[in-house]
């Protein structure tokens, strides 16, 4: 059983992917529910949602073309305590290949590095998953405060708007 349900649909602009649900999110049954997490505020600040949503609103993101998932669906907690394995990688690859969002955006370097099995830098990656572009973003977790930089999140929003403009 997944700790949190995927929020996926066809035709999404972006799917955000963390390593796994945090302990507070698992208890709340909602994505990015920790009090220090910047996810919901950042989505609003960069213009991907028209208002600041709350963690309980996570299912409503599809109306804005946004999806949510995690690399590891059956565990929760700190990245350092997670068991990253090939099954998790292949499962994520399969979900992204099926739904083909325009962008898969990793919320943090760790899930991206565990997925690709090599170091990554923030920003747009050279690698894709089929037609899906991949972004790596600084983690919104309160535990990652020292690495926070909204610049990459804003660059993602600009990239998504450019894709929409090109699509017509």
Image (cartoon, helix red, strand yellow):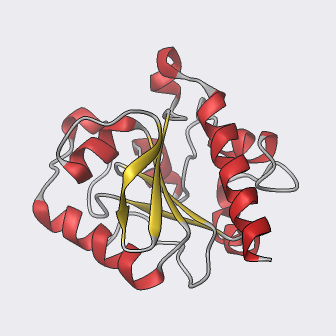
In the rendered image, is residue 108 in sight? yes
**Can you tell which quarter of the image residue 165 is in?**
bottom right
- Total numbered labels: 0
Quarter that holds the N terminus: bottom left
**Can you tell which quarter of the image residue 75 is in?**
bottom left
Outermost residue to the right: 50
| Residue plotted at (70% across, 39% down) | 154
| Residue plotted at (22% across, 33% down) | 80
Outermost residue to the top: 146
For residue 31, side relative to residue 42 (left or right): left
For residue 6, side relative to residue 160 (left or right): left
| Residue plotted at (29% across, 70% down) | 93
**Can you tell which quarter of the image residue 113 is in?**
top left
The answer to whether 94 is drawn above or below residue 78 in the figure is below
For residue 153, side relative to residue 95 (left or right): right
Q: Residue 24, image x and y in percent?
A: 48, 43
Which of the pair 56/60 is nearer the observer? 60
Q: Residue 162, image x and y in percent?
A: 73, 58
Quarter that holds the C terminus: bottom right
| Residue plotted at (66% across, 52% down) | 159
Which of the pair 122/127 is nearer the observer? 127
Outermost residue to the left: 86
Which of the pair 49/133 is nearer the observer? 133
In the rendered image, is residue 35 in sight? no
Q: Residue 161, image x and y in percent?
A: 75, 58
For residue 137, side relative to residue 79 (left or right): right
């Amino acid at each position: 059983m997944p700790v949190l349900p995927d929020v996926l649909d066809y035709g999404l602009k972006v799917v955000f992917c963390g390593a796994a649900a945090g302990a507070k999110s698992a208890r709340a049954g909602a994505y990015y529910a920790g009090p220090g997490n910047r996810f919901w505020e950042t989505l609003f600040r960069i213009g991907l949602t028209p208002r600041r949503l709350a963690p309980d609103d996570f299912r409503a993101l599809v109306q804005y073309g946004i999806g949510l998932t995690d690399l590891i669906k059956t565990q929760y907690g700190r990245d350092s305590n997670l068991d990253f394995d090939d099954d998790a990688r292949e499962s994520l690859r399969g979900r992204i290949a099926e739904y083909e969002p325009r962008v898969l955006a990793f919320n943090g370097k760790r899930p991206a590095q565990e997925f690709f099995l090599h170091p990554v830098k923030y920003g747009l990656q050279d690698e894709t998953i089929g037609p899906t572009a991949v972004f790596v973003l600084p983690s919104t977790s309160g535990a990652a405060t020292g690495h926070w930089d909204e610049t990459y999140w804003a660059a993602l929003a600009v990239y998504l708007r450019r894709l929409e403009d090109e699509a017509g």
